[in-house]
Image: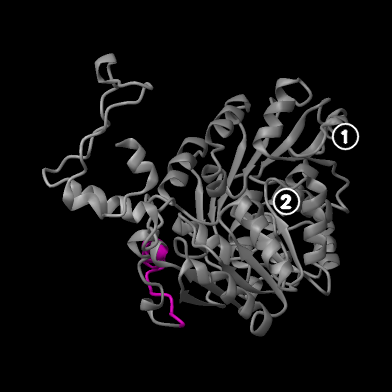
Amino acid sequence: MNPTFAPSQTFADLGLAPELLRSLADEGYASPTPIQAAAIPQVLAGRDLFGCAQTGTGKTAAFALPLIQRLRADARKPGPRRCRTLVLAPTRELAAQIYESFVAYGRHAQLTAAVIYGGVGQHRQAKAMLPGVDVLVATPGRLLDLINQRLVDIRSVEYLVLDEADRMLDMGFIHDMRRIVAMLPEQRQTLFFSATLPTAVRELADTMLRDPLEVKTTPRSTPAETVEQSVYFVPKREKKPLLIRLLQEEATGRVIVFARTKHGADKLQRDLTKAGITTAAIHGNKSQSQRERALAAFKSTQPPVLIATDIAARGIDVDEVAHVINYELPHEPETYVHRIGRTGRAGQTGAAVSFCDHDEQPRLVAIERLLRRPIPARNDRSAAPEPAAADSPGTSRHRRRPARAGSSAHAGNRARRSSGAAGKRPRRSPPATPADRVAGGSRAAPPAIPPAAANSGRSRRHRRAL
């Protein structure tokens, strides 16, 4: 079942309480998005929900608003170190963003909330949980750490939300998620949200939801229609000059450049900085304070080019991102949809440009198969030729340097070829015996050098060996 959406609906039509309508007015929200209009009435009715909507369509408000209203209607105080609502998110940035949304939407509802995630000290987080809270937003790893230390108790959770479930699976949180869910009461309301819908996500949802209502506002893994996509076929060695040219001539405003690895993101930041381009990097090896400073700068009126990895980028909730550049194509096609979902949000237009070298062309094919349409190319596919055999993976990097003509090694090789008429190298003569010695202790003369090799220009070292 997929509830219909009437474009003329307002938040009041969805049954939200006056205090929530006040908060929405404070935030400048005029009308609900499709996912909000479809999900809010069902969550208010107590249904389990399986929601699939692309990034930037308002999933957070779709579950935060009705949950705040349900908590407000049954205003029970949570016990020490306990929470009534648990929201799981894959990254620190996304957890912080969801927490801020609950605080903003619930400012007139007098609810308490806390957020816990790794990368920072746990003292303040444990202290915030001491009296108990209505809403706890957490990343799975840090949550389990505090549970094991008995600093958090989730045995009385009434509402469970899994946001960006597909990314949590990609990051390997599947076992942590199952451990957490096993600790929760069976009688609870569960809301399961995902930006994409791979098979693994579907299977996980089936184990956690009871008779869920499915809400899909877009087809499986479909990017926003407001994003103009294109691809450059370019050799790997020419990606950096092309990126610099695009950033200097075309990509203006807020720009996110995606790299596959943390090391690659740092190296790319250094290279762009040398080219005179202001940059900031965000990835898992950055401290929380560094990531917060990078995001704050990116949200400013003079934003740097933000270089990000896929995991860290899930918490980037910034409006008016003009360009997304895939410096390297991702291994998973669904990740491509997440990346370009950073632009073209909430009906705005954006551009997504991808660089594709020869080895990445199978990934491009997989992405186009998922999108069910080709991505327009800005140049010919032959611009990214297959690397030469000498440069292909597995070829030794230590190649023999050719000997110079006339060198001793070159001459010695000629000598061995000429002296080896029978295909054998000359042998060292055996040590002289006493019978071979003459007065003065000298050794008997060595065998005569074959005439063919006499004038071959043997090296001094080779003559000694003989």
Magenta portion: prevailing SS class: helix
Q: Is residue 137 above or below residue 181?
A: below
Q: Amino acid at mark 1?
A: Arg
Q: Is residue 103 above or below residue 234?
A: above
**Category of crowding for the residue at label 1, using alpha-carbon neighbours closer than 10 angstroms: few (below 14), some (14–19), many (at least 20):** few
The magenta-colored residue range is 360-378
Tag 1 residue = 124
Image location of residue 459, percent across then percent down: 36, 48
Judging depth in this view, the residue of 98 and 434 nearest the camera is 434
Residue depicted at x 22% and y 38%: 426
Residue 268 magenta-highlighted: no
Q: Secondary structure at mark 2?
A: helix
Let me know if residue 165 appears in the view.
yes
**Category of crowding for the residue at label 2, using alpha-carbon neighbours closer than 10 angstroms: few (below 14), some (14–19), many (at least 20):** many
Tag 2 residue = 93
Q: Looking at the image, what colour scheme do you see?
A: one colour
Residue at the extreme top of the image, as rendered? 434
Image location of residue 451, percent across then percent down: 17, 50
